[in-house]
Amino acid sequence: MTDQTAVLVGVGAGLGLALVKAFANDGYTVFAGARKASALKELSAAKDERVIPVDVDATDPAQIDDLFAIAEKKAPLAVSIFNAGTFVRSNVVDTSPEAFERCWRTGCFGGFLVARAAARLMLKRSAGTIIFTGATASLRGGAGFVNLASPKFALRAVAQSVARELGPQGIHVAHVIIDGQINAARHAHLTSEREADSLLEPDAIAKAYVALHRQHRSAWTQELDLRPWTEKF
Amino acid sequence: MTDQTAVLVGVGAGLGLALVKAFANDGYTVFAGARKASALKELSAAKDERVIPVDVDATDPAQIDDLFAIAEKKAPLAVSIFNAGTFVRSNVVDTSPEAFERCWRTGCFGGFLVARAAARLMLKRSAGTIIFTGATASLRGGAGFVNLASPKFALRAVAQSVARELGPQGIHVAHVIIDGQINAARHAHLTSEREADSLLEPDAIAKAYVALHRQHRSAWTQELDLRPWTEKF
Amino acid sequence: MTDQTAVLVGVGAGLGLALVKAFANDGYTVFAGARKASALKELSAAKDERVIPVDVDATDPAQIDDLFAIAEKKAPLAVSIFNAGTFVRSNVVDTSPEAFERCWRTGCFGGFLVARAAARLMLKRSAGTIIFTGATASLRGGAGFVNLASPKFALRAVAQSVARELGPQGIHVAHVIIDGQINAARHAHLTSEREADSLLEPDAIAKAYVALHRQHRSAWTQELDLRPWTEKF
Amino acid sequence: MTDQTAVLVGVGAGLGLALVKAFANDGYTVFAGARKASALKELSAAKDERVIPVDVDATDPAQIDDLFAIAEKKAPLAVSIFNAGTFVRSNVVDTSPEAFERCWRTGCFGGFLVARAAARLMLKRSAGTIIFTGATASLRGGAGFVNLASPKFALRAVAQSVARELGPQGIHVAHVIIDGQINAARHAHLTSEREADSLLEPDAIAKAYVALHRQHRSAWTQELDLRPWTEKF
């Protein structure tokens, strides 16, 4: 048990919920920022006093700043995770400027806001961990993926820039490249063993995030990839 | 001489002007989109009938679409170059959401709009070249450079995605990483020879863009770097 | 405690010894391949029955095959780590073909031999972990570093190729990029706290190797970096 | 016409012959190092006095040094190209140490020898161009490709290291990533147009090499890729 808080932004489905659970189990009071009613409902249903669901628009600077202020008021902020993103597959000629902007706003701008708010608090103590969720599209663009790759590349640049700025001030900044499909099944026992671990298990991913947070500052990881054993890459 | 047009967006200083001159010399009618009065004045002063200065806001979808429509009306669009960008160095904690957004809007969103407008016209003929100007910050973030790296990474993702989408349809899409300082001196003869070519010469860069456009489609380059011989990298 | 073995090749100094200790503590019988008399002596002096020092030439196929055969005879091989390398800084014009070849032989060829021997045993059980130690020079060449970068790039290619070949057969292959100077001090308490963790602590690195081995196969890491918080990168 | 020489090592098939022709047409006396009798025969058959076929083992330091000494004796060396390589697809467990070593010796060690010999001559004049032929496998390993990727990665490290060492001394060092299949057909007119340029045309590639050599030193390219318009990447 710690007397510290973690703030997660972008709790939409499997991975977000697993991250909330993992850091709550690690002893943190977790402020779980979500937009989807289903996610907020599921967070509340768990009745875990360590988990505080918050309806937050990750693209609104004031809402993000408020979320972090509330968490810090409860207890010192130790961990901040940005896990949001949205994407609709389309060719560049068919992509509206509005859709392109919306994907950037959710996938990158929100990440900048989260990093900035977290950094301001963590710098007071020269300690803390900021983690960004990336994807295969963080490393390469593809036909039909301009809406995903562009924000994901941009978010990776934020992670690198912030890591180089904050590392020497004691704050660990990491970027996780998730390469493969995440298992969304609620009831993994319904699937065969082989099928199950051909997908990324949310709990296994969350374990890697916790391990990143626990790294000693003499040997910090800035970037790692995660993929299922069966993945072609 | 050709009876085709080139559209350049982001003619602010040395490189933009050199690109305009190079493609005009190569026989294209060049529509040179600029924002700065000084650039527009300099473009007009050249009194080159092959060069048509246009005051355009690269971040406005309607203005970009209009610019390309006007060019295409004059003659078929053969070349499109996105060369815009803006940047103010600052740490992430000191960067306002407005500044972060403005840099993305100029450095990436404008590039998406240009690529989209160019692609729609070029696809009619299954031919044409789209080139994006990148920088060292397209490949790595750095402390104080979040405002530059994030849009530049995002623009590179656009270039890659569009290249993979449009290449097999006959359109050449390339991304040029400019690594080093561009020589802004109007009168290069005022500087010593060694000093002069320790900086990137705009005309030498422009030559590389023309060479990209001339490549045979059996051997297209998607990305190349350009740096002065004295540059540490 | 497990009834399995680990084979480490390239136990020369701080990191090698820390890796041996970490996997022994994790319950493995560790075969520690070394060339330096000092390392072999230190391994013996520890009087840990879980650690078996072996004088081995990592560049000799027969010796590597023998080492793995002996380990497998003792107990099933679960972990294999290649940590060898050698390097003398020199410009390309001053580098003898012999020196260039020697650095490749130690830094890459040995890694191939280790991966091949480990893979042959691990494939029988469709299980096991193979880890390679990389460096900053695995990602970029530099003036004076041709002897280091060339083998390190080559070793990374081995790691990637083997990962893509063996992953779907149940064997986890990872490459660790160590970016910074490793603390070689025996008595860390002699240094100030700040100085101490400005260098990579061998025990902190070793912890990351153990964590890689423990990852669930639904979320394996192929590559991660490790650097001290104070490192410029 | 120039009164300078070019040395090419690795003239085995389509691309090598096209490079020889391109630099001869550009006015250089080209020393064309080859191993295959067929290539040597074809070079002789062309009866171009600007082309001098040389039977050379690229992996023998003395033969490489001799080749460059002979070229320099004829006229100052201006261009050096390393284009050799060999590869047999096989899994790591099936790859003999001899095969792995042979592929490195031809694909990387030879490149080092060529760069070293060229650099020694070019440094006398602080001028010249050294180009290495890379491949998709220079950037990523793959199952069954350990024998190709490992030397190609290693060669790229040589190119980068030598570029950073020799650039500031006036020597241009570039690495070309050839991504796709090269058209080996002697009589391109036998194939349909679409088929023909779905493959990389040797003459189109050679043109890019000549363009690299001609770049002004204020804007040098260190790396570029070349692929056919239809290539998935």
Image (cartoon, coloured by chain):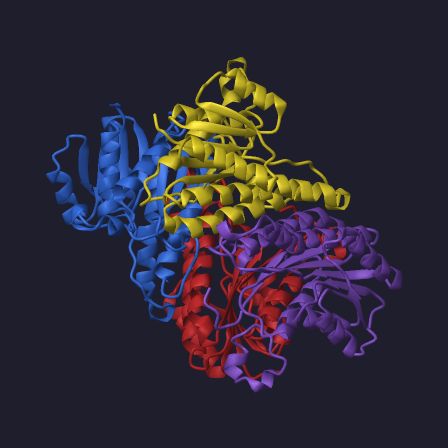
Chain colours: A purple, B yellow, C red, D blue
In depth, the one of C69 and D90 nearer the eye is D90
Residue B121 sits above or below residue C190 on the image: above
Q: Is residue B215 left or right of residue C110?
A: left
Residue C208 sits above or below residue B67 on the image: below
Quadrant of the snapshot with the N terminus of chain A: bottom right
Residue A152 locus on image (x, y percent): 59, 54
In depth, the one of A78 and B17 nearer the eye is B17
Residue D34 sits above or below residue B202 on the image: below
In depth, the one of B13 and C94 nearer the eye is B13
Identified at 43% across, 61% down, the residue is C158
Identified at 41% across, 57% down, the residue is C105
- The residue most toward the front is B73
Identified at 58% across, 47% down, the residue is B154
Is residue B134 visible in this depiction of the protein? Answer: no
Residue B88 locus on image (x, y percent): 69, 36
Residue D97 locus on image (x, y percent): 34, 64
Q: Is residue B37 left or right of residue D150?
A: right
Identified at 32% across, 56% down, the residue is D103
Residue B152 locus on image (x, y percent): 58, 43
Q: Is residue A51 left or right of residue B8?
A: right
Query: Which image quarter: residue C211?
Result: bottom right
- The residue most toward the right is A73
Figure disc tally = 0
Is residue D140 visible in this depiction of the protein? Answer: yes
In depth, the one of B97 and B47 nearer the eye is B47
- The residue most toward the top is B190
